[in-house]
Image (cartoon, grey):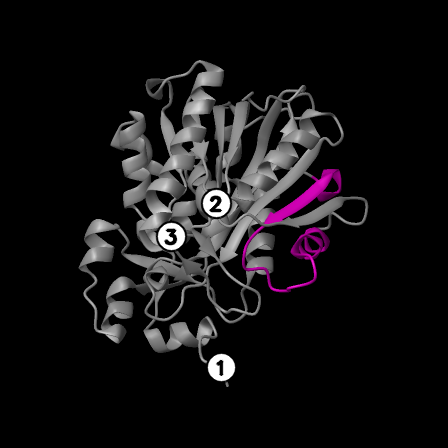
């Protein structure tokens, strides 16, 4: 297994997130179904989740995230060579979301655009492809987005964690970016056919293999990909200041970190699931976004995603000086987290269209 190292040095030029204002607590969901919220709050470390409003979907979330990333990058959208959207809850079954985003931000028509699917790692699939296009010299800048309005069947454990939100990253070549935010050191991908989570056509909600989603799926892929990356780059856990793993809940990333030899304080700054839930394709990218909101030049950041089905992408970035000058050009992740309005289960059902009539 070789690391995916581009020919041309690739950097993050801009980053931006968007999280809807509405929240529903695990207590409110548990109250409706006569369950105790203790397991979700104390063991899985989930307090509440973000809920998209009636006028929000993956396209609008992606557009808002992209605008924030462009604002930070100081880029003319016409300079983008690609716009990719990774999601498992796109608004149209047959019609790309990427073209909607590209048109809305003013990047069309001379651009490559597509939607990506790989459960919760669709966002990092977009990132890998942007890195490849920029790193080969085919384009100067690419936009990678991970966004979801995640689904969970009523009373299913997923309903307590399936949140809404997303993040956009602008990837550029070091030669074309005067104020780089973070330099890519390398990346790896690790994929197997492990059917832990799926949704058949015409089904409203996904199915999952309960505990099977843990050891053979999440932990096997996250740990294997992270180990491969560190081996390929000759790095060890202590070389990283921050670590971001996919966050289906709060327990899994902390356990993965411990098994790999990372400390809790390396993981906690990017651990957002207690406040906004699992953003699926936007989960790991939003964790990285939160880290870039606070990191200092010279910090090394590890990012490892996970997508059911199953696979992981792992990246190593070194934060650059541009992170300081660009940070305050757009709202931070914590700004969106603090800006919230709690709703009850009835309004939640209305917003998420769980009542069909």
Residue at position x 26%, y 50% in the image? 44
Camera-side residue: 15 or 302?
302
Q: Is residue 84 magenta?
A: yes
Q: For residue 356, which numbered disc appears in the image?
A: 1
Of the residues under marks 2 and 3, which one precedes in the sequence? 2
Of helix, strand and loop, which one carries label 1? loop
Asked whether the beta carbons under mark 3 and mark 1 sit within 8 Å of each other, the answer is no
Residue at position x 30%, y 26% in the image? 262
| Residue 54 visible in image | yes
| Residue 296 visible in image | no
Point out residue 210 in the picture as x, y percentages from the top left corner. 33, 55
- Magenta region: 76-105
Dividing the picture into quadrants, the one containing residue 169 is top right
Asked whether the beta carbons under mark 2 and mark 3 sit within 8 Å of each other, the answer is no
Of the residues under marks 2 and 1, which one precedes in the sequence? 2
Q: For residue 337, which numbered disc appears in the image?
A: 3
Of helix, strand and loop, which one carries label 2? loop
Q: Is residue 52 magenta?
A: no
Dividing the picture into quadrants, the one containing residue 78 is top right
Q: For residue 307, which numbered disc appears in the image?
A: 2
Q: Measure the C-alpha gap from mark 3 to mark 1.
A: 30 Å
Asked whether the beta carbons under mark 2 and mark 1 sit within 8 Å of each other, the answer is no
Position of 165 relative to 8 (above/below): below
Q: In the current view of this chain or complex, which residue is farthest to the right?
A: 110
Of the residues under marks 3 and 1, which one precedes in the sequence? 3
């Amino acid at each position: 297994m070789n690391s995916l190292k581009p020919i041309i040095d690739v950097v993050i030029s801009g980053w931006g997130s968007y999280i809807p204002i509405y929240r529903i607590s695990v207590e409110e969901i548990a109250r409706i179904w006569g369950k105790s919220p203790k397991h979700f709050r104390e063991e899985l470390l989930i307090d509440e989740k973000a809920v998209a409003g009636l006028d929000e979907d993956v396209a609008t979330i992606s557009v808002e995230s992209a605008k924030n990333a462009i604002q930070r990058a100081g880029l003319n959208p016409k300079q983008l060579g690609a716009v990719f959207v990774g999601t498992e809850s796109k608004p149209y079954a047959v019609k790309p979301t990427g073209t909607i985003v590209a048109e809305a931000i003013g990047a069309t028509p001379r651009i490559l655009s597509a939607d990506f699917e790989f459960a919760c790692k669709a966002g990092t699939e977009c990132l890998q492809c942007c890195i490849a296009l920029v790193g080969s010299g085919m384009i100067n800048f690419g936009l990678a987005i991970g966004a979801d309005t995640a689904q969970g069947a009523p009373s299913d454990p997923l309903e307590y964690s399936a949140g809404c939100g997303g993040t956009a990253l602008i990837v550029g070549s070091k030669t074309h970016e005067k104020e780089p935010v973070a330099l890519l050191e390398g990346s790896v991908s690790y994929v197997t056919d492990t059917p832990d989570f799926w949704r058949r056509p015409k089904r409203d909600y996904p199915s999952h293999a309960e505990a099977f989603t843990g050891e053979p799926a999440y932990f096997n892929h996250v740990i294997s990909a992270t180990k491969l990356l560190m081996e390929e780059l000759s790095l060890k856990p202590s070389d990283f200041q921050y670590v971001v793993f996919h966050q289906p809940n709060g327990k899994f990333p902390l356990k993965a970190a411990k098994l790999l030899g990372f400390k809790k304080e390396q993981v906690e700054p990017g651990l957002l699931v207690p406040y906004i839930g699992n953003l699926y394709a936007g989960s790991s990218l939003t964790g990285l976004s939160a880290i870039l909101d606070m990191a200092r030049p010279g910090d090394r950041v590890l990012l490892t995603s996970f997508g059911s089905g199953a696979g992981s992408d792992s990246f190593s970035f070194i934060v650059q000086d541009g992170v300081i000058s660009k940070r305050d050009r757009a709202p931070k992740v914590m700004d969106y987290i603090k800006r919230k309005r709690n709703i009850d289960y009835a309004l939640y059902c209305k917003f998420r269209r769980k009542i069909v009539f």
